[in-house]
Amino acid sequence: MGMLDGKVVIVSGVGPGLGRSIAVQLAGQGADVVLAARREHRLRKVADEIEGMGRTALCVPTDITDPASCDGLAAAAMEAFGRVDVLVNNAFVDGTFARFDEADPASWRATFDVNLFGTLGLTYAVLPHLKANPDGDARIVMVNTMSIVKIEERFGAYAASKGALATAAKTLAVELGGFGIRVNTVHPGYIYSPKVEWYLNHLAEEQGRTFDEVYAERADETCLKYLPDADEIAGAVVFLASPLARPITGQSIHVNAGHWIG
C-alpha cells in the first residue's frame, strides 16, 4: 500500500533531472502520473520506468506558455483517469545569465513568461478539475528555488520570476483553501546533477582551481556539508502530495541541506 494509491498526479517539466525523480517517487507511492514537457522522447523514458513499476503513465507533450496546450493536458488527464488529485509545477527556464545592466529586458520578460505566467496558466487549466476532486482534498506543489532568498549576480531574471511565483502560491493558498486545495512550495538549492557538475567544473577552470575545491566551497556553505541530488529533493514534493501534509498549505519548505535558513 502506498500513500498515494488511487491518486492521479500531473507533473510538468519532466526530464532527466528533478521532474523524473518526482514522477517516479510519486508512482512509487501508488499514484498514476501524467507526464508533461515539451520533448516527447524525455517523457517516454520516464513513462517506461513508471510502467515497469506497475503504475500507469500518460505522456502529454506540453508547452506551458500556450494556453491551448495547457487545456489539452488537463483534458487528456481527465479523459484517461477521470480525476486529478495533485498538480506539481516543475517546468521552468534558467533565464539569462547576465547582469541587469548588460541584459536585454526582453530576456527577463521571456523568463517570466515561463516561470510565472506559464506556471499560472497550467494551474488555471487544471484548476476546475482540482476543485471537482472527489475527495475534496487536492494539492498544488510549486517547485521554486533558494535563489529568491540567496541572491547572486547574474540570476536576476530567474530569481525575480520565481520570487513572484512564491507570492502567487501564497495567494492561491488563501483563495483556494475553501475548495480543499492545498498549495505549497519547495525551494531547492543546488541540486547535484551533471548540469551542476558542469557548472562547478566551469567555475574551477575559470578560477584556476580544482573541481573538488570548488565543490567543497559550495558544500561548506550548507549545514550538512553536501549538495543533495534530485531524488532527495523529490521526497519533499511527495510529502506535500501525501496525506501526511493534509493540514499544510501556504508554506515554503527549503530543501537544500541547510544552505539557507530563514
Image (spheres, grey):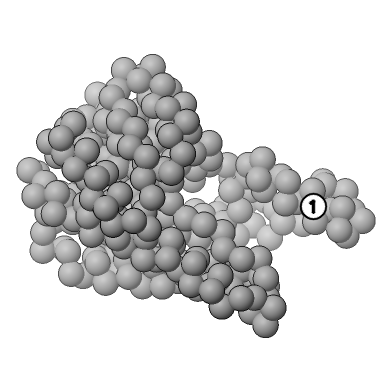
> Whole-percent x and y of residue 140?
28, 53
Inspect the image, locate mark 1, and give the three-letter code of the amino acid beneath it. His
Q: Nearer the viewer, residue 240 or 89?
A: 89
From the image, tell me which residue sits under label 1: 202
- Residue 259, quarter of picture: bottom right
Q: Residues within 10 Å of mark 1 (few under 14, many from 20)?
A: some
Q: Nearer the viewer, residue 140 or 68?
A: 68
Q: Residue at x 58, y 73 (%)?
A: 156
> Whole-percent x and y of residue 87?
28, 48
Residue 98 visible at all: yes
> Whole-percent x and y of residue 186?
42, 56
- Residue 51, quarter of picture: top left
Number of marks present in the image shown: 1
Q: Residue at x 19, y 43 (%)?
A: 75
Residue 86 visible at all: no
Q: Residue at x 18, y 55 (%)?
A: 127
Relative to 204, does residue 2 appear above or below in the rendering?
above
* Direction bottom: furthest residue: 101
Relative to 148, does residue 65 appear above or below in the rendering?
above
Relative to 170, does residue 204 appear above or below in the rendering?
above
Q: Nearer the viewer, residue 199 or 113?
A: 113
* Direction right: furthest residue: 208
